[in-house]
Image (cartoon, rainbow, N blue to C red):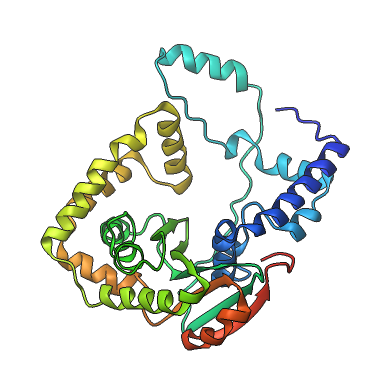
Amino acid sequence: MHPAFPEDEVKKLVAQRQDELRGIKDNPQQVLGAYFTKTLFGEHPYGRPPNGDEVSVGKITRPDVAAHYAKVFTPGNAVLAVVGDFDSADMEARVKKLFGAWKGAAPTPTAIPAMKPVTGKHVLLIDKPDATQTYIAIGNIGLAANSPDRAPAQVVNTLFGGRFTSMFNEELRVKSGLSYGANSRFQYFEQPGPFQMSTFTKNATTGAALDKSFEVIATLHSHPFKEEDLTSSKNYLRGTFPPSLETSPQLAHQLVVLNIQGLSRKDFNAELAAEQTTTLQEANRVIDADFPSDNYVLVMIGKTSEIAPLASKYGAVTTKKISDPGY
């Protein structure tokens, strides 16, 4: 509640963070998502990595930190979730004693525009000369946190790339041996966030892995699922849900996330119910509406001297070096 933000500590932390951000580029899997969202969203706020990059972090000064704290870290802009075995009245009194003197209204909300899905086929090729594998991300703009498609899309994505026995992983890992893993996911924000498919493969099998990935997308759009597939997905979601709220920290986190997303407990429960009542017709509708097909962003991090010749097959190519500052 009363931070000092010592100048020397701010400078030290900025330098440490810059080193960390440069260092994680040694592991393409850690930065693939950042390159993907930057390519997909560009200068839109969702294109900015939450932890910044070595360029943006280097510009932060102590006055920036203090001004941001004064504006954003206010009780009017905070959510406190307390979960555990306690007397509610006693806990409320304790919270008021600790935070009752904390003052400050919420800042004016930042208006975040909704971005439309990209059209066309866009390829970003990032050169990492010492790479022995190519790291691949494919996707487009997906769904907002309050989208009515969220529940049926979750059922479909579980079958497509959301579990070990999904189509994507089965084709890339189990059947073809092109990768040790392949998955897909939606990220839900106030405005539509990204839908991203991710995998990796040896340099020599990059083309085969890409072809197989787009083959899986085409198969999805042929509406391959049957009622028994939906039942399997619903059972999986129902079975994996309880462990996600087993601990007090998990529950507290979920309560805060719901509040930030503007969703109530009723909304949350309604989504769980909607997953279980998703029909085959709804599943096929969201496949057509929410999963990319001919329009996408494709990001590859790898050894361009070996994989560049095949990149243009998948769209208009832009190139970068992983050593270039930022994303």
Which residue is drawn at the image coordinates 56% and 19% (left, top)?
96
Classify residue 185 by image quadrant. bottom left
Q: Residue furthest right?
A: 8
Rendered view: 141 above or below 235: below
Drawn side of residue 204 relative to residue 56, left or right: left
Return the residue nearer the eye: 279 or 94: 279
Which residue is drawn at the image coordinates 54% and 61% (left, top)?
33
| Image quarter of the N terminus | top right
The number of discs equals: 0
| Residue 259 point in image, percent of width and height | 45, 41
Rendered view: 91 above or below 279: above
| Residue 119 point in image, percent of width and height | 46, 82
Rendered view: 184 above or below 4: below
| Residue 138 point in image, percent of width and height | 45, 71
| Image quarter of the C terminus | bottom right
Q: Residue furthest left?
A: 227
Drawn side of residue 306 relative to residue 52, left or right: left
| Residue 216 point in image, percent of width and height | 31, 73
Which residue is drawn at the image coordinates 65% and 68% (left, top)?
130
Which residue is drawn at the image coordinates 42% and 80% (left, top)?
295
